[in-house]
Structures are given as structure tokens and as C-alpha cells.
Image (cartoon, rainbow, N blue to C red):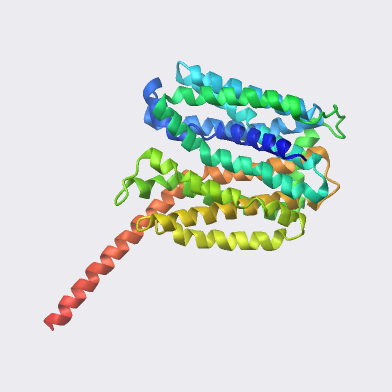
Amino acid sequence: MSPSLRLTLAALCAVSVANIYYAQPLLEAIGTDLAIPSGQLGWVVATGQIAYLIGLMTLVPLGDWMNRRLLIALHVALAAAGTLLIAVSPNTLTLLAGVAVAGLFSVVVQVIVAYTAAVSDPAERGRNIGSVTSGVVIGILLARTAAGLIADVADWRTVYLTSTVAALVLASVAVAILPRDARRTSPTTYRKSVASVFVLTATDRQFRTRATITLFVFASFGVLWSGLAFPLSEAPWHLSTTQIGLFAIAGLAGALGATRAGRWADSGRAAPATAIALASLIVSWWFIGQATTSLWLLVLGVVILDCAVQVAHVTSQSLIVAGDPKLGRTDRRLVHGVLLARIRTGSSHDDLGVSLSRLGLDLAARCRLRLGRAHRVGSRSSHTG
């Protein structure tokens, strides 16, 4: 696979997955503009997540019936139609419809990764998957930062207009440079294609293990990036939203630092690489836990965590795709579909994780305060005695 093709596929992943994350830093502005009560703003994010999961189960198998090059371009263009509808929405109903369309067709990310695996030589499959999936992590990391910066300069609607233009340009490029893929006849029915994913989940131990690992590492990833604003916006740092968004650059460095993960998988070192990644992930939280005392330690923790997440992600995908050479086209797409569904499930627990983290920090602070008081009381009693 040529470098230009890998770059194009990674860019398509980044622009597509970003559609799901733009709204998070824009909710307040959207609610003010469209008079949406704060208690209902959560539906803006939830609608996109639900639509994405529906797309994984219903749109992915179409790759066995359609020209994959055109399917990728079509999905990207339809997602762009959704972001355009968001940009011009005059009311809540239109906004949610646009969010649903954008989320539904952003499932093209999964089609792109499966397509990458299908057109790659076995010797470089892991490397290509690693390069392309780096676009997924880049899109997740930079979506919030880009949305915040553009909204500060213009407004929240400009964020979605920019996304629309970028997606349409990339869709045109995809039609022009992706290798032609003749229409294929599926070896099974559409219903069986969808049902086979549940069979794989029940019978493939490696798939279950790797999907579960990916769920938890992305849940950890989501907790970090959803909750990072709390310690940075409070004492002693008091950073602005834009300044906090710049921490995504550190995360980007970590994700790009794991580009060799695919090569490790190709050379048969996926298992030790994953073990090291998981150990590093645990260690990273000690550094992240110093966020209230040292920004440098926080940055180091962010780099380590994002690198670990990308290594675990890429090695897991590579092992699943290579694990059974008998997997058909639909099975491979659905394997990626369930894997990414678990990733989405892990990411969708961000708010729960952040709430638990805040609760844990609060309890720790209260315990420390009570221990301090008990120590002082004890010292006074000993002096008195």
C-alpha cells in the first residue's frame, strides 16, 4: 500500500470519527442558540452514539454487495449531508436529525479499516492497520480542540460547515485514488451476515478477549479526555478551554508514537506488545494523578496513556483479522464492527467514569482532611497528658 493511500484512508477516518465528538465542547453554545434546556443537551451526544451503533449493525454488511470504493465515498458524503443539516438547523428536531445522519454514516470508519485489511499484503497488514487507525485516534483527540478553536473564532455552526467541506473533498479524493473494487456476490444473505456477529462473539475466544481489552483501554482513554478539564480549570491552574484543548497535542504525540505497533503485530510480537501497553496504561495514571501539582507529569502521563491505548488497539485488530484465515468478507467487517461497538461502548461510559473519578477524589480529600484533624487532636491530647 502506498504512503499516499494510507494517508488518505487515515484522513477519512479522522474526519469521519470527529463528527461524533464535535458537539461535546459546543453543547453550551448550541443550547443557547437553539433554546435547548440544559437537561436535554445530553441527547445531542447520545443521538450520534446510538446512530453510530445502528450503522455498525446495518450498514457494514453492504460492503459485500457494493463496490467498496464507492461505498466509502458514499458514506462520507452522506455523513457530510448530516453535518450540513446540523450547521443550518433552525430547531432541536432538525439538529437531532442531522446528528443522527452524521453518526449513522460515520460508521464508514469501520468500513475503511476492514477495507485496509482486505487490500493489504499479509506481511504489512498490521503496519497498514496501525497507520489507518491512527487517524481514528487523531480524529477523536483533535475534534474537541478544533471545535473549540473554530467556535472561538466564528461560531458553532462554522465547525460543522468546515467538517462538511472537508468530508466532501475527501470523498472526491477517495473516488479518484482508491483502487477499483468490482462488485462482488455475497456468499450469504444479509440477515445471516448480521447474525454471524453474535456467533463470532459466542465462539471466538480470541475475539472476545481482544474486544474486551479494547473496551477497557478506550474507557480509560475516554475518562481521561472527558475529565481532564476539571483539574485544569480549577486551582491552581485556572486554564481556559482553549488552553486545555492544547493538551490534545500531547495525546497526539503519544498516539503517533505507537505507529510501530502494527509492525510488531506483523512480526508476531502482538502479545508482549499488548502486555507492555497494559502495564504502561496502569503506570500512566500515577502521572495523571499528579495533575494538581505538576503539568509536566500530567503531560507525560497523557503521552504514555495514549501510546498504550493505540498499541493495544492496533495489535488487537491485527490479531483478530489474522486469527482466522477462513473469515469471509462480511465476517471481517463485522468483527471490526463489534470491536468498534465495544470501543464506542467504552467511550460512552466517559461521563460515568468521570463522575466516579470525581467522587473518588472527593472521598480521598475528605479522608485526608479527617486524618489531618485526627492527627492534630491526637497531638493536642498527648501534649495535654
Where is residue 372 shown, x and y percent of the image?
25, 68
Q: Quadrant of the N terminus?
A: top right
Q: Residue at x 45, y 17 (%)?
A: 91
Task: Name above or below for residue 151 compared with residue 116.
Answer: above
Where is residue 274 shown, x and y percent of the image?
65, 59
Q: Is 282 placed left or right of 38 in the picture? A: right
**Nearer-the-camera pick, 302 or 173:** 173
Where is residue 12 shown, x and y percent of the image?
65, 33
Q: Residue at x 67, y 60 (%)?
A: 273
Q: Residue at x 55, y 26 (%)?
A: 163
Where is residue 144 shown, x and y percent of the image?
48, 37
Q: Is 96 placed left or right of 7 in the picture? A: left
Q: Quadrant of the C terminus?
A: bottom left
Q: Residue at x 43, y 47 (%)?
A: 227
**Nearer-the-camera pick, 185 or 248:** 248
Residue furthest out toward the front: 3
